[in-house]
Image (cartoon, rainbow, N blue to C red):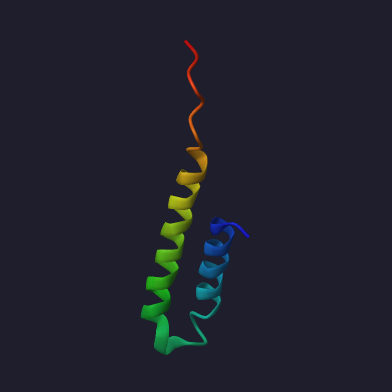
């Protein structure tokens, strides 16, 4: 499982638990935003693969 898939699933779990666990809404909001941010960062890291060697 890649980091992006894990982060998206974790964000979904936070969204699902939003109403049943109303005492923890602040914590779920912080966790959801953090996981979403990590997914975005993982996307940019994955896209910037190793650079191709330059032949002279």
Residue at horizontal 50 percent and vertical 23 percent from the top: 53
Vertical comparison of 22 with 53: above or below: below
Vertical comparison of 25 with 45: above or below: below
User: Can you give x and y, in whole percent of width and height, for residue 42 in the image?
Assistant: 48, 51
Quarter of the picture holding the N terminus: bottom right
Q: How many marks?
A: 0
Identify which residue, 35 or 23, lies in the foreground. 35
Identify which residue, 42 or 28, lies in the foreground. 42
Residue at horizontal 36 percent and vertical 79 percent from the top: 26
Residue extending furthest top? 56
Query: Based on the displayed image, in which of its 4 quarters is residue 25 positioned?
Result: bottom left
User: Can you give x and y, in whole percent of width and height, for residue 34 in the image?
Assistant: 40, 65
Residue at horizontal 47 percent and vertical 38 percent from the top: 48
Residue at horizontal 47 percent and vertical 10 percent from the top: 56
Residue extending furthest right? 1
User: Can you give x and y, in whole percent of width and height, for residue 40 in the image?
Assistant: 45, 52
Relative to 11, is 2 on the left or the right?
right
Relative to 11, is 31 on the left or the right?
left
């Amino acid at each position: 499982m890649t980091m992006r898939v894990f982060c998206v699933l974790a964000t979904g779990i936070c969204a699902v638990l939003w109403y049943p666990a109303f005492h923890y809404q602040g914590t779920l909001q912080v966790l959801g935003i953090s996981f979403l941010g990590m997914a975005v960062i993982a996307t940019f890291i994955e896209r910037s693969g190793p650079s191709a060697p330059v032949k002279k």
